[in-house]
Amino acid sequence: MQNLTLGKTPVCVFDAYGTLFDISSVARGAQDILGPNWEAFSETWRTKQLQYTWLRSLMDQHVDFWRVTKEALDFTMASTGIGDADAHQQLMHLYLSISAYPEVLKTLSQLRTQGVRLAILSNGSPTMLEAATSNAGIGTLFEAVLSVEQAGVYKPHPSVYQLVVDEMRIPKEQVCFMSSNSWDAWAAKAFGFKVLWCNRFGQAPEQLPWAPDGQITDLSCLPEMIVV
């Protein structure tokens, strides 16, 4: 944890996939199908998933994240020679029961007890986010669960981050945004949020302007850092 003063931040907003939810847990739960290369499979699936969100946004060809996730899985299975329709169905089903990181429930509960308003801002479709938050037992902790479907374009478009300002009715300078995705953290800072990059995987920082206000390795330190 950094020795960092964020000032008044009554609203905490979290990215979902990779920040609250462990993306690798999906492929990990299908090791009987994927075998010892499940981690590489997971990385390819995630990379292609993000690429498709960016490409579709640039081409103005939006579909929801469930469709994007399916298309990215189609690519990954084709590129690895796994063509089983039952395996495809199982992997997509596992995405709806994706696991939260170990510290998430306790951290969110502590923040709520401190009076912090909580929200999610995610590429995920409303159905995907409802399933994930319900499975993790954290759905009732959030004042708002915001999907890019309300903007019709994916992150990092500024209109997505504007959803928080409009929904929570608060100046963007009073929002603390957390993401483990570096590109998301840098974009949220460019928009004007206070930002903590949850660098779970020890990645190098982006070489772009708009660096986040701080860097953390998981979410457990947030109750000590956030001032309402």
Image (cartoon, rainbow, N blue to C red):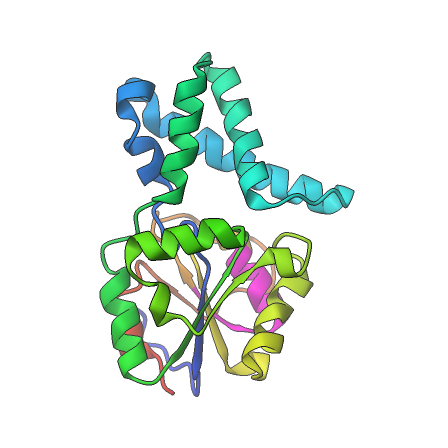
Is 185 in the magenta?
yes
**Residue 109 in which image quadrant:** bottom left
In front of the other: 170 or 218 = 170
Up-down relation of residue 84 to residue 194 (above or below)? above
Residue 65 lies, in percent from the top left, at 56, 44
Task: Identify the main secondary structure in magenta.
Answer: helix
Tell whether 6 sits left or right of 147: left
Q: Which residues are magenta?
A: 184-196
The quadrant of the rendering that contains the C terminus is bottom left
Q: Residue at x 62, y 37 (%)?
A: 52
The quadrant of the rendering that contains the N terminus is bottom left
Is 58 in the magenta?
no
Q: Is residue 221 visible?
A: no
Q: Residue at x 39, y 35 (%)?
A: 93
Q: Residue at x 56, y 53 (%)?
A: 207
Q: Residue at x 34, y 52 (%)?
A: 200
In front of the other: 86 or 99 = 86
In front of the other: 227 or 11 = 11
**Residue 14 in which image quadrant:** bottom left
**Residue 96 in which image quadrant:** top left
